[in-house]
Amino acid sequence: MLYLENNLASGVFTPDRTAILKLLASQAAVSLENTYLYGDLAQAIEHLKRAESHLAGEKRVLELIASGQRLRDVLAELCKLFEESVPDCYCGIYPIDDRSKAFEFGVAPSLPASYTESIEGLSLAFDDSPRGRSISKKSQIIAEDIASDPRWLEAPCRPHVLKHGLRSVWSTPIASHCA
């Protein structure tokens, strides 16, 4: 809505001036509509760029698999793909040895080695963290705030996780078809 007032003189809105104001008002409406369209276009371009980036990441992972690269390298690239998709998050993947029921190794390319080293070889029987519960119950567990989440209060790994600057966690177990 365009609303004009004049408190200096009467008779200011003559037919000629009204015609000019109508023209300016229509131009303002067109400019406003163009602003919305450009905003929608910018969002569509951003969405397309994210989709192209995601597709390129998937291609990198598939190329590593097809060329027979080590599992650690494939998982590291997969972590990077997740981290590109969700900024300000760190991805870690921790394969489990089915025979020993222990974490074989950890892959978390954006976290320091000191974070994953303590997980390598850890028996699932001794992992009573929400991560361990997620695995044993085969269900997703999300903790919005590790510092105050009651499921993390007694977890022996809680100080280690907090020391590395992590504040929330999303644990989702993924089982292979042969497991």
Image (spheres, rainbow, N blue to C red):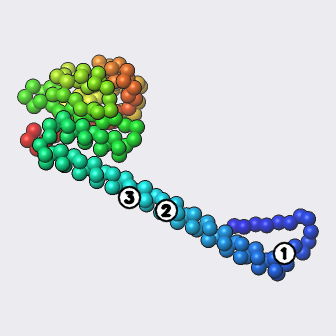
Residue at image coords 52%, 66%:
37
Q: Which mark is residue 40?
A: 2
Considering only order in the chain, which callout, 3 or 1, is on the residue closer to the N terminus?
1
Q: Position of residue 97 (x, y in %)?
A: 12, 30
Q: Amino acid at mark 1?
A: Phe
Tell whether label 3 touches label 1 (CB within 8 Å). Answer: no
Q: Please indicate whether residue 52 sits to the left or right of residue 176 in the image.
A: right
Residue farthest front in this picture: 67
Query: Which tag is nearer the camera, tag 3 or tag 2?
Result: 3
Considering only order in the chain, which callout, 2 or 3, is on the residue closer to the N terminus?
2
The part of the image, by quadrant, that contains residue 136 is: top left
How far, Cα to Cα, is label 1 from label 3?
Answer: 49 Å
Residue at image coords 71%, 72%:
24
Indicate the quadrant containing the C terminus: top left, top right, bottom left or bottom right: top left
Q: Amino acid at mark 3?
A: Leu
Q: Please indicate whether residue 105 sits to the left or right of residue 30 in the image.
A: left
Question: How many numbered marks, from 0 up?
Answer: 3
How far, Cα to Cα, is label 2 from label 1?
Answer: 37 Å
| Residue that carries the numbered disc 1 in the rendered image | 13
The part of the image, by quadrant, that contains residue 17 is: bottom right
Q: Position of residue 98 (x, y in %)?
A: 10, 31
Q: Amino acid at mark 2?
A: Asp
Kindly state the secondary structure of the residue where label 2 is placed.
helix
| Residue that carries the numbered disc 3 in the rendered image | 48
Q: Position of residue 64 (x, y in %)?
A: 18, 44
